[in-house]
Image (cartoon, grey):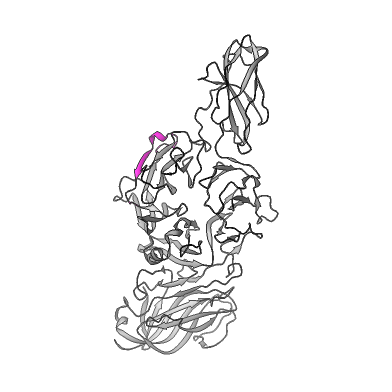
């Protein structure tokens, strides 16, 4: 807590740190001295200082058309971005910051739609929920995620050979570019072999351009119902004939009988060597099913690889999150978990209904953090705030093993009153360097124009739930990490991706409006100080010397809603005297990176004082404040 001292007949009120974050739940006079009732575009450091956030800069030098950047991620050292129905990559670009279209992906995604994507086994899997799903391995290698099932073949006996007289049936399977075999196709009509012969097969199906077929296996059986066994392979996707000269009894392996392809998905998560997705029931409209791929085989989702979560309740599976041994499926108003006991055997898995009765606002409104998942919850069409879900054993929520605790109480007003329900689907969460970023819109009909920034380092410290700060100036439809840096795809139709932490105080040349108001000092929760009318005489500001420019320090009295009375502090290392500023007593050292400034306010009376720091909303200017002292005289009791 702040200290209150009596020095030479004057009261010194000292605030030693400013890292409590944004708090709009309590009145400005009741919040902690470390918190702010009104701040914008600031961050907090490990020593408790508050300062202007770092800026952002365009990543791609050429816009990806005049469209939103719907999603982005890092893949094999290249950045991948989706915009206007096409996937783009920096692979092959000269500078590494120029996007090139993957032409084979053109029109494979809905323009402006959310894209769900996951990298597994060095393959990128993606879909927009309506089209696909697709897989990508670089260059122009863009194909179906699943493995197509071939049509039937035809055949007849030709020359003398090893195939004994009988009636035979043939079928073919496709092998994709990852050397994974798909389901066997339809059987041919019976091929009658009157005398030992080589059977010549014709009309052998080839895979489509999106099938990604490299090889085909040929199977034979003496019954249309099987069992079929392998008699050879074709090591390309062009040849349409095959000669079978395998004697009965010398055939090879059995085929794959169930290699069902995954459906288009709106959300996808990797856990325990499987991909988990949302799914419809028999191609219907409801997406209340969870589906998963085979163990260590992301191209196949067997027919029985699904779980129905409250089928018929009218709610879709919106998002999927994974933590430890649990995969959680979030719906509108409820959530469910699958406890993965043996990853290779889904018959051992246990379904758990999460008793918190919370859903999620959108497919991107969750992110994995240490020990659990943070998500933006909803219930009965009302936003419930940020929640932390941690599961070890989900049998009970009272034993501490499953926790769903709100971490957004301090910003509850903003969440409940500023986020329109029509924009919930666009909410996007991401974590980078133990900071949480939430992109959101503030009114109906707009794209994401604001961010909430949460310092996760402070969660759990002396009961703290993290330090929040609102940001603007970055319009982020998606937020993602690439090669050790954080990026945002524009939610407005600019076609640009922007890098956070650019090292300058501007957003691609636009000023960052950065400020921090303190609590109303001298009001509630201030003990004896609350009983007096006070004269504010001096402000002592410990600040960092960031450059050859001024920052502003303002004060206002007794709940005034105006901008306050302003003073300048020069942040130049050389130092000087200016305007109404008077340096405190002491020898100046121009090599210091931080300094104390004394502002002589004059006689200003009131019960409560609020102090503001700002960067004057000017390009390439910032501020950083370590400590503040107010010198006051006590005039009389109220």
Please determine whether, in this image, residue 327 is positioned above or below residue 616: above
- Please provide percent x and percent y for residue 462: 36, 63
| Left-right relation of 162 to 12 | right
Query: Which residues lie in the magenta part?
Result: 341-357
Was residue 353 drawn as part of the magenta stretch in this picture? yes
Residue in view at x 60 percent, y 61 percent? 494
- Please provide percent x and percent y for residue 615: 53, 76
Residue 443 visible? The answer is: yes
Residue 122 visible? The answer is: no
Please determine whether, in this image, residue 112 is positioned above or below residue 224: below
Name the quarter where the N terminus is drawn.
Answer: bottom left
Q: How many marks?
A: 0
Please determine whether, in this image, residue 367 is positioned above or below residue 25: above
Judged from this view, the residue extending furthest toward the right is: 94
- Please provide percent x and percent y for residue 635: 33, 90
Name the quarter where the C terminus is drawn.
Answer: bottom left
Judged from this view, the residue extending furthest toward the top is: 195
Residue in view at x 70 percent, y 54 percent? 94
Q: Which quarter of the figure has residue 172? A: top right
- Please provide percent x and percent y for residue 289: 42, 42
Please determine whether, in this image, residue 624 is positioned above or below residue 262: below
Q: Nearer the viewer, residue 584 or 616?
A: 616
Was residue 305 drawn as part of the magenta stretch in this picture? no
| Left-right relation of 252 to 383 | right
């Amino acid at each position: 807590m702040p200290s209150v001292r009596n020095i030479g007949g004057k009261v010194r009120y000292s605030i030693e740190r400013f890292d409590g974050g944004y708090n709009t739940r309590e009145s400005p006079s009741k919040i902690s001295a470390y918190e702010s009732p009104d701040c914008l575009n600031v961050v907090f450091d490990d020593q408790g200082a508050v300062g202007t956030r770092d800026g952002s800069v365009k990543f791609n030098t050429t816009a990806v058309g005049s469209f939103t950047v719907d999603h982005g991620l890092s893949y094999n050292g290249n950045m991948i971005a989706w915009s206007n129905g096409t996937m783009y990559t920096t692979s092959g670009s000269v500078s590494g910051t120029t996007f090139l279209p993957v032409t084979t992906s053109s029109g494979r995604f809905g323009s402006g739609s959310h894209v769900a994507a996951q990298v597994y086994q060095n393959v990128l899997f993606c879909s927009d929920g309506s089209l696909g799903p697709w897989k990508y391995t670089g260059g122009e290698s863009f194909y179906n995620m699943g493995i197509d099932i071939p049509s039937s073949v035809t055949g007849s006996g030709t020359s003398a050979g090893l195939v004994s007289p009988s009636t035979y049936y043939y079928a073919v399977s496709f092998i994709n570019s990852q050397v994974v075999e798909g389901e066997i196709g339809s059987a041919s009509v019976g091929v009658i072999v009157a005398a030992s012969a080589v059977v010549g097969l014709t009309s052998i199906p080839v895979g489509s351009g999106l099938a990604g077929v490299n090889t085909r296996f040929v199977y034979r059986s003496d019954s249309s119902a099987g069992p079929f066994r392998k008699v050879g392979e074709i090591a390309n996707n062009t040849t349409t004939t095959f000669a079978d000269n395998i004697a009965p009894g010398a055939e090879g392996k059995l085929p794959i009988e169930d290699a069902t392809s995954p459906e288009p998905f709106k959300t996808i998560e990797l856990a325990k060597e499987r991909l988990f997705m949302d799914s419809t029931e028999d191609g219907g409209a409801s997406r209340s099913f969870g589906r998963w791929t085979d163990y260590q085989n992301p191209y196949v989702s067997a027919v029985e690889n699904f779980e129905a979560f409250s089928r018929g309740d009218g709610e879709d599976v919106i998002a999927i999150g994974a933590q430890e041994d649990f995969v959680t499926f979030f719906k509108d108003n409820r959530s469910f978990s699958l406890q993965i006991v043996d990853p290779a055997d889904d018959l051992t898995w246990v379904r758990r209904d999460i008793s918190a009765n919370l859903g999620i606002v959108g497919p991107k409104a969750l992110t994995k953090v240490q020990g659990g998942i943070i998500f933006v919850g909803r219930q009965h069409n009302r936003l419930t705030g940020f929640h932390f879900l941690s599961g070890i054993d989900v049998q009970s929520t009272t034993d501490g093993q499953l926790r769903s605790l709100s971490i957004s109480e301090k910003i509850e007003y903003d969440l409940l009153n500023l986020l329109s329900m029509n924009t919930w689907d666009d909410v996007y969460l991401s974590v980078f360097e133990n900071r949480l970023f939430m992109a959101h819109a503030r009114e109906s009909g707009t794209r994401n124009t604001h961010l909430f920034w949460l310092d996760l380092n402070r969660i759990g410290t002396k009961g703290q739930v993290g330090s929040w700060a609102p940001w603007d100036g970055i319009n982020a439809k998606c937020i993602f990490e690439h090669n050790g840096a954080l990026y945002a795809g524009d939610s407005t139709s600019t076609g640009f991706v922007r890098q956070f932490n650019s090292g300058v105080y501007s957003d691609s040349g636009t000023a960052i409006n950065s400020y921090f108001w303190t609590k109303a000092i001298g009001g509630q929760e201030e003990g004896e100080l609350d009983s007096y009318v006070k004269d504010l005489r001096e402000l002592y500001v410990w600040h960092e010397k960031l450059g050859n420019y001024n920052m502003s320090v303002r004060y206002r009295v007794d709940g005034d809603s105006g901008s306050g009375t302003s003073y300048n502090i020069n942040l130049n290392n050389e130092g000087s005297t200016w305007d109404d500023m008077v340096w405190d007593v002491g020898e100046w050292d121009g090599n210091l990176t931080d300094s104390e400034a004394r502002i002589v306010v004059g006689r200003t009376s009131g019960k409560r004082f609020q102090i503001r720091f700002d960067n004057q909303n000017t390009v390439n200017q910032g501020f950083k404040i370590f400590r503040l002292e107010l010198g006051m005289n006590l005039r009389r009791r109220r």
